Amino acid sequence: MPTKSRPGAKQQPKRLAELANVGPATLGDFQVLGIRSVGQLARQDAFRLYERLCSRTNARHDPCCIDVFMSAIDQARGGQPRPWWHFTKRRKAALARRARIARVA
């Protein structure tokens, strides 16, 4: 028996193209990465996706791709749609931590 959703509650996107901030370019990136579903995306790490994308395309992509990936992954995991730039500060902090760890190692 189907459950009724709360009035005004947003349905979880069922397709990658329904995620906020995911347009033709990001869909193309997902295709290159082998990401075919929202469920599959929910199990990913944005930084690893970015590294794989750069490796598979033999090009360094704009680091803002990580922000878009973070946004899409967050929403795929049930988060509210947010603009990709909402994740920029988090990305920069994570990259700074990784750089500090690399210098110590």
Image (cartoon, grey):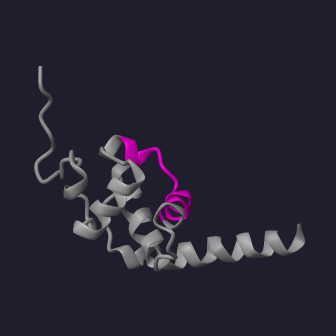
Number of numbered markers: 0
- Does residue 3 sit above or below 7 in this rendering? above
Farthest-out residue, top: 1
x and y, in percent, of residue 101 in the image: 80, 69
Relative image position of residue 64 (x, y in whole percent)? 44, 78
Q: Taking 72 as reference, is 102 left or right? A: right
Q: Quadrant of the N terminus?
A: top left
Query: In the figure, is residue 64 to the left or right of 38?
Result: right
Which segment is the magenta one?
Answer: 40-53
Quadrant, the C terminus:
bottom right
Point 32% across, 74% down: residue: 83
42 in the magenta segment? yes
Image quadrant of residue 90? bottom right
Residue 19 appears in which quarter of the rendering?
bottom left
Q: Position of residue 94 (x, y in %)?
A: 63, 70
Name the side, left or right, on which 15 lies relative to 53: left
- At x 72%, y 72%, the residue is 97
Q: Residue at x 55, y 73 (%)?
A: 91
